[in-house]
Image (cartoon, rainbow, N blue to C red):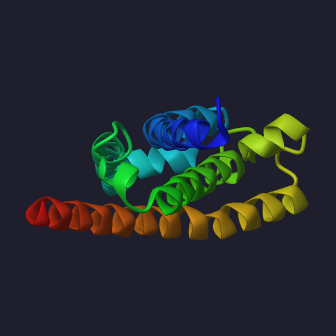
Amino acid sequence: MTDSAASPTIRSRALTIAGIALIVGPIVAAAIKFASFGWLMILWIWMLYPPVLLLLGWALQIVIASTGYFGRRAPFALHGRSRAVAAAWTTIAGLLLIAFFLVDGADTSWGSTFMYLTGTASDDTAGAVSTTIATIALVPWLGGWLWLLAEWIVALVRRARVRRRG
């Protein structure tokens, strides 16, 4: 098999894997966060708007993944493939970092999943480090999500223009 013949297959696999990561990534992040579930998460659920916003964002992410990443005629298969893959992995990496490092508390101890795994639960220094990393991870998560949305819109517009011409 020549390198040029393998190249489209490898590129389409990267696109498919990134699309799957967009769908499954939030479930993995929730599982990671539930390992250190505490009062902060309970308050967020009771406030209702954070879970609703997260679910709406995830629903749009599923729509983007299902319409943009799968199939030979998908918008990202035709336009902006490498940027779409980079945007997907940027948002998923940021989300997983936040889930792993977001500090939460319980009745007897507090910490992030990272802190519980390293045995540093309720340690102020580890809490500060964990909170800092989670806060910094907001940039790739939200920035990557907005980048993903912009790339999807551009790819849809380009595909529509090609269809109109052809």
In this rendering, the count of numbered labels is 0
Measured as percent of width and height from the top left, residue 19 is found at: 44, 41
In this picture, residue 78 sits left or right of residue 144: left
Q: Nearer the viewer, residue 135 or 28?
A: 28
> In this picture, is 37 found above or below 97?
above
> In this picture, is 118 found above or below 148?
above
Q: Nearer the viewer, residue 80 or 98?
A: 80
Residue farthest front in this picture: 2
Res. 123 in view: yes
In this picture, residue 144 sits left or right of residue 6: left
Looking at the rendering, in which quadrant would you find the C terminus? bottom left
> In this picture, is 4 found above or below 98?
above
Measured as percent of width and height from the top left, residue 35 is found at: 66, 32
Please give the name of the residue rendered at 49% of the width and 44% of the height, measured from the top-left corner. Answer: 15
Measured as percent of width and height from the top left, residue 153 is found at: 27, 66
Q: Nearer the viewer, residue 127 or 160?
A: 160
Q: Quadrant of residue 98?
A: bottom right
